[in-house]
Image: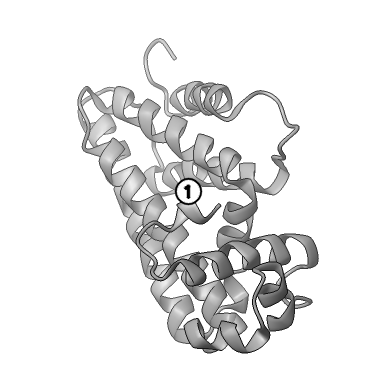
Amino acid sequence: MTDLWPDVRPDAARRLMAAAVAAFGERGYHATTTRDIATAAGMSPAALYVHFPSKAAVLSAISRSGHEKALAMVTAAAAGPGDAAARMRVLVTEFVAWHARRHRVARIVQYELTALPEPDYEAVVALRRQTDAVVRSLIEDGVSSGVFRVSDIRSAARAVLSLGIDVARWYTAESKPDPETLGADYAGLVLAMLGAAGA
């Protein structure tokens, strides 16, 4: 799981983040201690403080990274080739597949927001607003070009993102179908919801 944060240095910090995901996933954020995280990473509790000043700082690093990845993913898909329907298909397929494939970290990223310290919470909310704006802009493009038939663009954008985010709540390693197939299935549902021709 340390591959989720290739830019985080040193390796010990990545190991702590991966251990925190495992601990938060098993016990919940509030029931997890810094000792739990450090032990799962094979370190002493004191070693955690070398890289993160608190348990909340670990959560913030995980959450911010996850939301930055989501924003980059939807931005790249929305700017890709094809009409609005083709770009939305890619966006939803990748967004849903990521939330299924990385369901443990995605669950923490999406559902532990209220545990973040206020400045980190505000930073993550800003990233979520940017992500929503990208999806809304793509839907607006589709409506203006006649590809989509939607009257409430804001609600449609929220629905698109909510479908993908909710996958992290229920998906497990044993779930079917596989993440890529699920993403493609959800993309078809989204295009139908947006009134795309032939969806």
Q: Position of residue 112 (x, y in %)?
A: 62, 68
The image's colouring method is: one colour
Q: Secondary structure at mark 1?
A: helix
- The x, y position of residue 66, in whole percent, is 46, 58
From the viewer's perspective, is residue 122 above or below residue 24?
below
In front: 73, or 92?
73
User: Which of the pair 99/126 is nearer the observer?
Assistant: 99
The reply to whether residue 102 is in sight is: yes
Q: Which residue is mark 1?
A: 158
Residue type for callout 1: Arg
199 over 135 or under it: above or below:
above
Q: How far across and down, in percent of the image, does residue 58 sit?
A: 54, 75
At 35% from the left edge and 44% from the top edge, which residue is drawn?
73
* Res 56 → quadrant: bottom right
Image quadrant where residue 128 sits = bottom left
What residue appears at the point 66 percent right and 76 percent down from the top-left corner? 38
Looking at the image, residue 33 sits to the left or right of residue 68; the answer is right
